[in-house]
Image (cartoon, rainbow, N blue to C red):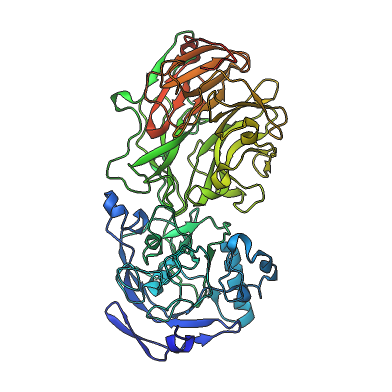
Amino acid sequence: MPSLREVGVCALLITVGHQVAIASEPVTNSLGMTLVRVEPGEFVMGSGDAPPRSQEEALERDWDEAPAHRVRISQPFLLGAHEVTNAQYEQFDPEHKMLRGKFGNANEDDEPATYVTWRQAVAFCDWLSKREGKPYRLPTEAEWEFACRAGATTPFSTGEQLSAEQANLGLERDGKRKVAAVAVGSYPPNAWGLCDMHGNVAEWCLDWHGPYSAEPQADPVGRADGIARVVRGWSCNRPSYQAAAFFARSANRSGHLPEDANVYTGFRVVQAELPATRPLPPAEPPLHQRDVKQTPARPSRPDSDQPYFIDYSKEGRGPTIPPEAWGPVYAAHNHFAASVVCPNGDVLAMWYTCMGEADRQLAQAASRLRAGAEKWEPASSFFTVPDVNCHAPVLLRDGGRIYHFCTQSLHGWDYAANVMRHSDDSGATWSKPEIILGRDDPDTLSQPCSAFVAQDGTLVLACDGDQGHKDERVMTSGDKGKTWHVRQGDMRKAAGAYAIHPAIVERSDRTMLCWLRGPKPMPLLVSRDFGDTWERRDSPFPGIGVGQKAAALKLASGAILLMSSDTSKELVGGGTFVALSLDDGETWPHVRKVEAPVGGYMSLAQSDDGTVYLIGSRMRFAACNEAWLKEGGPVQSGEEN
């Protein structure tokens, strides 16, 4: 292994674009950091002229890397040869030492400091600036990619390939899996003397993540606003089904919410003034956020005794995705539906969109049905944090506010942080997402599955357990989402079997009913204390399995509506069914088949005019009213079907 002196030789010749620059001798600062001088130059940032148009292209580059564009770095800067180590960071934050070893976190002095938020990384740079009287900061995304490439135009600074001998990608050099950070500088440096630009731990950059602009730029500093800060280089965190090196490419763009401190992300520093460049404006809002009216719409279908049913899959009235779409909205796989009727009367439906459900690129898409319209709008991007699995969307309306819940998952859909944001203008704009339950919390949970607003105003969110759905619990908030409490009742334990994906609803007496995916009959639970304890009840409905999730809703009339799948073909002959109870779930006098391709992971919502929206996976939607539901025949409570 070459020494730092050997990799930082004086007068190292570097080819930068069409220029030749001389790298000076590295310098050492007061913390013992080695800083490499990066000379000005030009390079092509990104990859491809447009987002991928096929799966083959999507396996070579990501949608947010395009369009590739020429960038000029006009001023030299000093960049840390290594990621900031535990010993260096803890001179600023001694309490960080308590995090060493957490979840396999780097434990030694010379290993990279992780469990550091973006703001903490910025604060470290500010502290170091004051300590030395010199300007320190995080690298811009452009500076980072320029330095990572080190003059190379190939996917990696090492060429077309990156091996376990060249970078820490979660594999030992004998090919065995080992997902752990190692001491900085354990792998050979690039041509400019910079170590671990590929792999080991991911690294915070200064910029907000946002779409690239095609024109040539000088010293870009990203977008003026966003939801995620750029992370580059990726880490030893190996994906389940995707090539580890894909995410460590020089052009690949990752990101995290600014407060997302995790075991895989650290940072390195720049010693230089921040470029005076103005940031690009925030990205244009997606289709479903444009021209959203703020006045309540007149009821388009006044509730009446006349039943009606609408199948939006007929005549092309449902949402569409072009077949060549491969990010951030994907034509390949669209699943796990959520829905809400906005205060202005529009209906907002959303789901996750991806190539594979465990993929890091899994994002969320949405479509809006404008009040009075007969056709849903084409799907557009709803929520994405690059290279983070944004799993399990849930929407909830509380008066004039809409809540959006989902997870930020780093091991497929596990190792998840639960996040929330809200809109007070019918989804035209959204608050910054915030973590409401961290992935390292003692009561960590995974996928949100359903939610309701209780009679006393409590927000109730039912979630799967993390680490393979080890438990199923409810989170509650009594202060409009400011703080959350994980209830201790384990629904899976109460069900007495592997039972997941809770569909919850509140009864008139303030007890909760919950249906779960699991064995026959469908597990049914009741809680009298907001989820601290659960007891099992008899269920008249068939169990459901892989690819299915039930939905439940308290209608404006007080009736309880359940939508699920008749897997036994004994209830309605198979397919999707809806069941209506007029006595808080004691009996079900009205059950009928949904003669439309609405199935999979389901969601229900009701508008002020009484229309009930039946939302399923793969953008299959329908609508009906309560009069149509009441045309169904009875099912006897307590009998298996």
Q: x and y percent of residue 611 in the render?
A: 48, 20
> What is the x, y in percent for residue 465?
59, 42
Residue 195 visible: yes
Which of these two is toward me, 69 or 80? 80
Tell me: residue 190, above or below residue 444: below
| Residue nearest the observer in this picture, 571 or 89 | 571
Percent position of residue 618, x then y = 38, 34
Say if 634 sits above or below 122 in the image: above
Q: Is residue 419 left or right of residue 369?
A: right
Answer yes or no: is residue 224 visible: no
Please state, as top left, top right, bottom left or bottom right, where the N terminus lies in the image. bottom left
Identify which residue is drawn at 48% across, 79% down: 81
Q: Position of residue 419 (x, y in %)?
A: 57, 46
Residue 376 as seen in the image, left or right of residue 491: left
> Left or right of 513: which side holds 577?
left
Residue drawn where x is 71% and y is 33% of the image: 533
Q: Which residue shows up at 27% across the image and 45% down it?
A: 324
3 relative to 52 in the view: left or right: right
Number of numbered markers: 0
Front position in the image: 189 or 290 = 189
